[in-house]
Image (tube, helix red, strand yellow):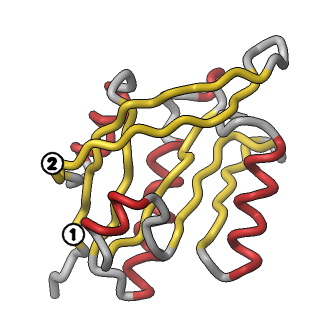
């Protein structure tokens, strides 16, 4: 899966069990196709300080062989619906600067550049299973809750 292996998934499930958010899993033919974590508060310092009223979508990823089939959009829709139902006024997410496809998806869905940049580093197993330190430079995008009729 795209979020760094089984340890990341276990951490996301633990967050859900604590009530800190919802771990979303999309299935295709009974197999995991993609995942996302909706946290009820931003959990990274700069984002939390700048957006104290926002939920955060993180670790949204789709299996490489299933990308471009609407799975990422479906996960994002589910996260947005849950946040809206809870009355969360804003949703934030950090998109890697080297991931223009994801950025286009978010911008099409009404997310806007908040002007905040964040850098994250974390261990990630490569295709051989070797754990490497990854550094991501990101742009924080924000969606304000729909308040229509």
Q: Where 6 sits versus 134, above or below?
A: below
Q: Residues within 10 Å of mark 1 (few under 14, many from 20)?
A: some
Q: Which mark is residue 43?
A: none
Q: Is residue 13 left or right of residue 122?
A: right
Q: Which mark is residue 144?
A: 1
Q: Say which quarter of the image contains residue 62.
A: top right
Q: Say which quarter of the image contains residue 124.
A: top right
Q: Which mark is residue 115?
A: 2
Residue at left offset 23%, top offset 44%:
108
| Quarter that holds the N terminus | top right
Q: Where 142 sits versus 72, above or below?
A: below
Circle 1 — which element?
Answer: strand
Distance from Cα at disc 2 to Cα at disc 1: 15 Å
Residue at left offset 35%, top offset 36%:
138
Name the residue nearer the viewer: 11 or 109.
11
Residue at left offset 28%, top offset 40%:
139
Circle 2 — which element?
Answer: strand
Pinpoint residue 40: horizontal percent, then vertical percent.
49, 76
Pinpoint residue 131: horizontal percent, then vertical percent.
77, 23
Pinpoint residue 4: horizontal percent, then vertical percent.
71, 36
Name the residue nearer the viewer: 55 or 134.
134
Residue at left offset 31%, top offset 68%:
49
| Quarter that holds the C terminus | bottom left
- Outermost top residue: 128
Cβ–Cβ below 8 Å for labels 2 and 1?
Answer: no
Q: Earlier in the sequence, mark 2 or mark 1?
A: 2
């Amino acid at each position: 899966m795209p979020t760094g292996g089984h340890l990341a998934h276990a951490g996301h499930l633990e967050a859900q069990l604590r009530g800190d958010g919802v771990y979303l899993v999309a299935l295709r033919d009974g197999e995991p196709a993609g995942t996302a974590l909706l946290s009820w508060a931003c959990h990274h310092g700069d984002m939390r300080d700048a957006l104290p009223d926002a939920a955060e979508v993180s670790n949204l990823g789709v299996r490489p062989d299933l990308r471009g089939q609407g799975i990422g959009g479906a996960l994002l829709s589910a996260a947005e619906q849950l946040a809206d139902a809870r009355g969360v006024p804003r949703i934030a997410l950090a998109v890697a600067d080297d991931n223009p496809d994801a950025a286009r998806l978010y911008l099409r869905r009404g997310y806007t550049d908040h002007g905040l940049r964040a850098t994250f580093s974390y261990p990630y197993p490569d295709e051989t299973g070797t754990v490497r330190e990854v550094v991501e430079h990101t742009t924080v995008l924000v969606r304000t809750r729909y308040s229509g009729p």
